[in-house]
């Protein structure tokens, strides 16, 4: 059932998957570390391998605006960005999700200015977590490939109709070459049929999109959007299952690792999960009952699944790849805490913002986090809400 | 082409909530009359947008999309590209014209980048900018289209400043700089001139740009019944010359029989009242007159090229 194994980095894997998904319109602007995606897609179009309109827009704001126009007109629509580009798009992200447009966007996660930094962290997408987009995070290029294909199916499903961000860490994944087990074109075709738009812009059936919503109507419109986003989680699980069965993969919204008898756990997102697994293995050899939960789906937040996996533990360390300034570490930490708060028995939850601006997160860092968690579990109390890791500074876990 | 030959369709339904005497309503109605087949409309945030689509009502009998303020040209580009791809792949049968509508704020200022990008890329669409010379939707703030000397709430008349200090941006020059197939200025006070230009815009092989002056009784501090008359005076004073740039060739389409002094245009408008009372500011009026004369001469020279 599988095609050939190709050597591709994360960006190339995304571009290759997009090509096989046959988008009608791509509107994108180059930004490191996502640029390889738009380069490859331009080449596919130039070589006639992909029959799509490639709009080389003059900014990311226009990229998302053009995607909105194209998706509203009924096209399968794709874009890619990172960092400042996503920040520039911010206004339009809300419009895309409010219109229920199934746009798929790859993100090569990158830090935000200032100082200028082209390397990886998740300040960009974490800052866009409340825009009404589904957010999927990937650990490696294989996942980027597989989840990009599934993202189109999720977005366009009539039970979902929401835009999807498919995120991979800048450079760590975007520029690292792996052997990717690809699918045959015809298998992608049968998994992902042509888009069937619900209310496209059509002169025979005119619709008005983007009207004025006065206070008498706005809350109901937003409530419908919230209900749709919450409901999408069931569809996302179904589509993962369908993909797993068709292609022999094993995707779920959360991925537990060594969790069966775990007493403490780390919760990680993106490429750091791979390193965390090595740390878990090492600690297990020393007799520490530690596990790991990898967060694949961050929006909608899998609250019930987080409760089931983490509820009975003594302590959980949440590894954020950004800082929510002036709050409690990162967004992931705060949301995991919130998800567990109403449980009668719940673990202590401590945040570990780390890997900022491309700083490597090494096995030692995870071991130090685990040691901190063991102390928390033993004392049954949390002294600090969060501790910045891999950083020179007072109270930090030193790099 | 005769007035009675215009199509009877009304793509913009009556009953919208634009102010009495609003220049936008009459102008957009005329713009839409130029289409023999319904277009897909992309609208910027503006008076027109808010006044025609208060949920659950709409005045639009054609597909209509409003995304945000500054991105109308980009949204229209997306609609155009989608149609190209879908028709090529056999998933859409016929080509629908794409009409982008935006005000002066959404075009001269915040939307200029998206417009420039879309014009450079050569999308097949018509972009109509209806300018009432200020941000009227937010309550009369100065824009790049506000003429020198005009009062607005952010170019107020104070003890030091006599209204807006800067000249209006020459948007046509910027647009023409993109070497697009067709660009023209219009006024609803000259409906047949507007129709002829819109038809050329529809037939253009690539992007077309139409710039319409739409008087605003609220913002200009004028009587609603003067809207059409003011449009006419704007043309006759050469403050709003009607011309086209057809594949690079300039042509003045309405030549005033007798060029009126700018006072004819300024005096009826409350936004220029401080130029006449309590003290006559002949210096500023002269400056405006000289500026208009210079631009008119320049246009006549361009026409001869």
Image (tube, rainbow, N blue to C red):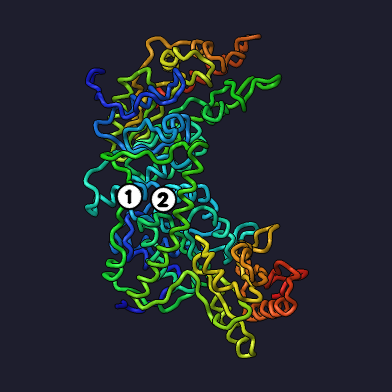
Q: Is residue B149 above or below residue A165?
A: above
Q: In this view, does B305 lie above or below A341?
A: above
How many discs mark residues in the rendered view?
A: 2
Read off the chain for label 2. Answer: A
**Left or right of A85: which side holds A290?**
right
Local packing at callout 2 (Cα closer than 10 Å; few below 14, some 14-19, many 20+) is many
Q: In this view, does A374 lie above or below B40?
A: below
Q: Position of residue B79 (x, y in %)?
A: 35, 45
The residue lying at 44 percent from left, 33 percent from top is B54
Q: Nearer the viewer, residue B268 or A48?
A: B268
Q: Is residue B238 visible in this depiction of the protein?
A: no
Pick out the residue farthest to the front: A344
Residue A387 location, quadrant: bottom right
Read off the chain for label 1. Answer: A
Q: In this view, does B4 lie above or below A35?
A: above
Q: Name the residue under label 1.
A: A198
User: If the image is split into quadrants, where does the N terminus of chain A sit?
Assistant: bottom left
Counting residues from the start of the chain, the first of labels 1 and 2 encountered is 2
**Left or right of A180: which side holds A167?**
right
> On the same chain: label 1 and label 2?
yes
Q: Mark 2 points at which residue?
A: A100
Q: Position of residue A256 (x, y in %)?
A: 52, 77
**Disc on res. A213:** none
Q: Which of A266 and A308 is in front in this view?
A: A308
The residue lying at 49 percent from left, 46 percent from top is A222
The residue lying at 39 percent from left, 64 percent from top is A40
- Secondary structure under tag 2 reads loop
Contact between marks 1 and 2 (CB within 8 A): the answer is: yes
Q: Is residue B17 visible in this depiction of the protein?
A: yes
- Secondary structure under tag 1 reads loop
Local packing at callout 1 (Cα closer than 10 Å; few below 14, some 14-19, many 20+) is few
**Left or right of A100: which side holds A48?**
left
């Amino acid at each position: 059932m599988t095609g050939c194994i190709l050597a591709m980095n994360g960006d190339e894997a995304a571009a290759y998957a997009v090509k096989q998904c046959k988008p009608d319109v791509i509107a994108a602007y180059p930004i490191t570390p996502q640029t390889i995606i738009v380069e490859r897609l331009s080449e596919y179009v130039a070589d006639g391998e992909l029959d799509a309109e490639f709009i080389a827009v003059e900014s990311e704001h226009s990229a998302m605006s053009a995607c909105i126009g194209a998706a509203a007109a009924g096209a399968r629509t794709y874009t890619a960005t990172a960092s400042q580009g996503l920040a520039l798009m911010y206004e339009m992200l809300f419009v895309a999700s409010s219109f229920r447009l199934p746009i798929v966007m790859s993100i090569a996660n990158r830090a935000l200015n200032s100082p200028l930094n082209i390397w990886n962290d998740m300040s960009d997408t974490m800052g866009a977590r409340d825009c009404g987009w589904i957010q999927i995070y990937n650990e490696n290029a294989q996942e980027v490939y597989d989840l990009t294909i599934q993202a189109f199916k999720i977005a366009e499903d009539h039970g979902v109709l929401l835009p999807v961000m498919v995120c991979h860490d800048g450079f760590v994944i975007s520029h690292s070459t792996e052997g990717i087990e690809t699918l045959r074109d015809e298998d992608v075709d049968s998994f992902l049929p042509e888009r069937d738009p619900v209310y496209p812009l059509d002169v025979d059936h005119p619709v008005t999109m983007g009207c004025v919503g006065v206070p008498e109507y706005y809350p109901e419109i937003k409530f419908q959007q919230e209900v749709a986003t919450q409901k999408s989680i069931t569809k996302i699980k179904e589509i993962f299952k369908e993909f797993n069965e068709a292609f022999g993969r094993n995707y779920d919204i959360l991925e537990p690792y060594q969790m069966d008898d775990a007493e403490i756990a780390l919760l990680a997102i993106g490429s750091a999960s791979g390193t965390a697994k090595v740390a878990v293995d090492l600690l297990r050899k020393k007799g520490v009952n530690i596990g790991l939960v990898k967060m694949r789906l961050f929006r909608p937040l899998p609250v019930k699944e987080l409760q089931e996996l983490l509820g009975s533990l003594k302590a959980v360390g949440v590894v954020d790849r950004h800082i929510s300034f002036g709050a409690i570490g990162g967004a992931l930490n705060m949301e995991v805490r919130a998800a567990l708060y109403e449980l009668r028995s719940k673990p202590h939850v401590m945040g570990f913002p780390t890997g900022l601006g491309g700083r490597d997160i090494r096995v030692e860092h995870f071991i130090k986090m685990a040691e901190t968690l063991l102390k928390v579990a033993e004392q049954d109390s949390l002294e600090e809400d969060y501790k910045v890791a891999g950083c020179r500074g007072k109270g930090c876990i030193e790099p | 082409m005769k007035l009675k030959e215009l199509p009877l369709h009304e793509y913009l339904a009556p009953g919208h909530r634009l102010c009495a005497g609003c220049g936008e309503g009459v102008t957009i109605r005329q713009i839409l009359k130029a289409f023999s087949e319904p277009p897909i409309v992309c609208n910027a945030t503006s008076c027109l947008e808010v006044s025609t689509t208060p949920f659950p009502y709409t005045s639009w009998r054609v597909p209509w999309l409003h995304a945000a303020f500054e991105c109308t040209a980009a949204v229209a580009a997306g609609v155009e590209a989608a149609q190209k791809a879908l028709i090529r792949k056999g998933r859409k049968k016929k080509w629908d014209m794409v009409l982008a509508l935006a005000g002066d704020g959404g075009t001269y200022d915040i939307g200029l980048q998206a417009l420039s990008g879309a014009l450079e890329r050569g999308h097949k669409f018509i972009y109509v900018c209806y300018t009432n010379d200020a941000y009227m939707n937010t309550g009369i703030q100065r824009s790049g289209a506000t003429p020198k000397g005009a009062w607005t709430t952010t170019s107020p008349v104070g003890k030091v400043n006599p209204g807006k200090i800067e000249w209006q941006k020459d948007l046509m020059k910027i647009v023409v700089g993109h070497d697009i197939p067709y660009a023209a200025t219009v006024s609803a006070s000259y409906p047949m001139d507007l129709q002829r230009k819109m038809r050329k815009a529809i037939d253009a092989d690539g992007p077309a740009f139409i710039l319409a002056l739409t008087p605003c009784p609220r913002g200009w501090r004028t009587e609603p019944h003067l809207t059409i008359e003011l449009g006419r005076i704007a043309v006759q004073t050469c403050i709003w010359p009607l011309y086209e740039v057809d594949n690079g060739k300039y042509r003045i389409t309405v030549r005033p029989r007798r060029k009126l002094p700018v006072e004819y245009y300024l005096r009826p408008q409350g936004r220029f009242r401080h130029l006449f009372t309590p003290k006559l500011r002949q210096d500023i009026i002269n400056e405006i007159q000289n500026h208009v004369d210079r631009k008119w001469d320049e246009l006549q020279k361009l026409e001869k090229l």
